[in-house]
Image: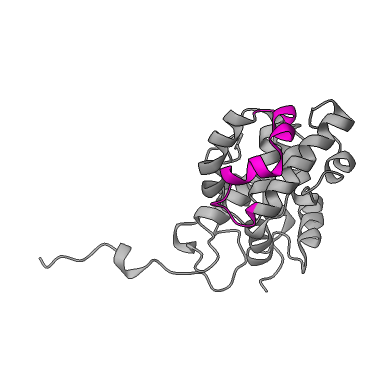
Amino acid sequence: MPKLMKRADIPAFLTAIAAGNPDPKTELHYQTAFQLLVAVVLSAQTTDVAVNKVTPALFTAAPDAAAMAALGAEGIGPFIKSIGLWSAKAKNVAALAQLLLERHGGEVPGEREALEALPGVGRKTANVVLNEVFGQPTMAVDTHIFRLGNRTGIAPGATPRAVEDQLLKRIPKEMLKPAHLWLILHGRYVCKARAPECWRCPGATWCTYPEKTPVPAETKPRRTKG
């Protein structure tokens, strides 16, 4: 495990990986808080790309909680069969839509406890909704953020919750809200799981990962004979 990144280096690291994107948005497609909640539930163990392929038709058929509850699990299932765990997700989405109607007038609540009481909604999903919709400085630790927390030394931890707690403690408060997506996007496109592309990482100067990957041979400019 790399050594802990210096607290003083964290703002510079985050600014570097932000790549001029001060107000990042999730790559999940949605129009309302309800649609984001459903999309995040569907994205568990599934890529955002896969979810974005099924939600347009689903949200056309059921754009809100009332319509989704009326559709029910049997009606939701055919729309999402191409994503992982679709059967269980269909049941959860139908049940959470029904509970939103019964407890919250069909609206998505802005409180963690109320969100986590919904079927299929755990701490990570609640954190995404609180951050994206309600502007709260939460940190939803997915596989990308867990990897970066440990690999870069910004917030090492043995569990997602441990990494989350470290990030909340170590990242400057004014950077917490956008940092969530900065880290996700950086992990998705640069600091990849199998082979981090350290050679093109703008945050490499501050990252404490000891085995930084060099420039691949195929990307190096070829010398020409003079």
In this rendering, the count of numbered labels is 0
The residue at the far left in this view is 226
Report x, y in % for residue 189. Answer: 50, 54
Residue 195 within the magenta-colored segment of the rendering: no
Q: Is residue 135 above or below residue 120?
A: above
Question: For the point 43% across and 69% down, which residue is it?
Answer: 214
Direction from residue 72 to residue 104 in the image, left or right: right
Q: Image quadrant of residue 205?
A: bottom right
Q: Nearer the viewer, residue 220 or 71?
A: 71
The N terminus lies in quadrant: bottom right
Residue 65 within the magenta-colored segment of the rendering: yes
Q: Nearer the viewer, residue 34 or 201?
A: 34
The C terminus lies in quadrant: bottom left
Whether residue 146 is visible to the viewer of this picture, yes or no, is yes
Q: Is residue 158 above or below residue 106?
A: below
Secondary structure mostly seen in the magenta stretch: helix
Q: How is the image coloured?
A: one colour
Q: Nearer the viewer, residue 108 or 220?
A: 108
**What is the magenta range?**
63-86
Question: For the point 77% across and 69% down, which residue is it?
Answer: 158
Report x, y in % for residue 146. Answer: 68, 61
Report x, y in % for residue 68. Answer: 70, 33
Question: For the point 54% across and 35% down, which residue is it?
Answer: 57
The residue at the far top in this view is 105
Q: Is residue 134 above or below residue 167?
A: above
Direction from residue 167 to residue 53 in the image, left or right: left
Question: For the point 57% across and 56% down, which residue is it?
Answer: 187
Whether residue 137 is visible to the viewer of this picture, yes or no, is no
Report x, y in % for residue 135. Answer: 74, 33
